[in-house]
Image (cartoon, rainbow, N blue to C red):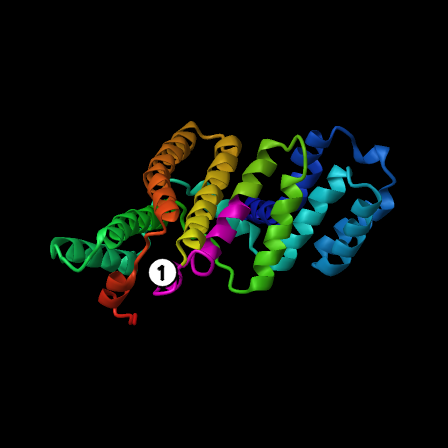
Amino acid sequence: MGRTRDHARTLFYLPLYLIFSIFISACGNTWEERTPSEYDRAVQFIDQKDYNSAILILGSMLQKNSNDQQARILLSSAYVGRSGLSFRKLIAMNQNIGDVSSVKPNSYEQKALKTINHLKSKNNPSLDEGQNKTLLILEKIYAFKIYVNNFLSTFAAIPSIQKKSQVLDLQNAIDLLEASTNLSTGLVLYRGLLRLVVFNYNLTSEYNLKESINCKTNVYELSLKINDMFYDIKGILSDLSLGIASKKKKKIIKDTIKECDQYYANINNEIDILIFNQSFDLKSFVNEMGGQCE
């Protein structure tokens, strides 16, 4: 029973454990070399869940010395704490990489692919070359989105966030870690898991194809979304590949990177052609999907 409680306590204090043991080794100095008062106060505020006070102290420290790695890492931890993200869930997600619990439903994407195939099979003479090219690229975009959904299913129970303020806090935490140098593998893994949580949120907002593809869709803006989606995934996979110790899980990540590159390469060239030719007509597709274009 005592061991279980000790284990739970270790999980609860994971951020501080990482900061004071694994992380500090990457900074190249020790707490004894610093004036401890400000750090101690910040850590105390984090332990007390007074994240705003910790953020004020650590932000001020970074303004005085932008190279202060320990303050930067602590500040990142404070932002994560303020977001309300459960560290235990992050640990569980890491432990279960590759253990597919359930594939995310792709009902909208599957409907879109069926609609595209239906329009192509009709061999409709009213579809001009631009519309046919549009259907071809849409087919690849929706196949990529299904791939993304299935990719997320390799992580059991990604912690969900509901508010934009939570996303901003997590993004601040990620940006702080990205600005840090010589990160330990533990920190790199931690950053990758945070990126994954934010990406999962963005799939229902910035990367929501149901909202993005309509009669007034701008193909250039759509291509930017696909690019952003791709590079977000690559960043996540790169962090996980560097941070994960298990050879089996590393192989899963490396195989996923190859698949992701193939899907993106399939789309990117044709999007560039459509942008260059300015031939992107969604009317037939949107109407078939239940929308209405004039």
Q: Which residues are magenta?
A: 193-217
- Could you tell me the amino acid type at mark 1? Ile
Tell me if I can see residue 55 in this picture: yes
Q: Residues within 10 Å of mark 1 (few under 14, many from 20)?
A: some
Residue 40: x percent and y percent?
81, 47
Residue drawn at the location 38% of the way across and 35% of the way down: 261
Q: Under tag 1, what secondary structure?
A: loop
Q: Is residue 50 visible?
A: no
The answer to if 199 sits in the magenta stretch is: yes
Residue 120, above or below 20:
below
Name the residue that disc number 1 marks: 213
Residue at (45, 54) in percent of width and height: 221
Is 216 situated above or below 22? below
What residue do we see at 25% from left, 65% from top? 289
Q: In percent of the image, x 84 and y 34: which residue is there?
A: 32
Is residue 258 or residue 38 the one in the foreground? Answer: 258
Q: Is residue 290 above or below residue 230?
A: below
Coordinates of residue 216 in the picture (x, y in percent) = 38, 64
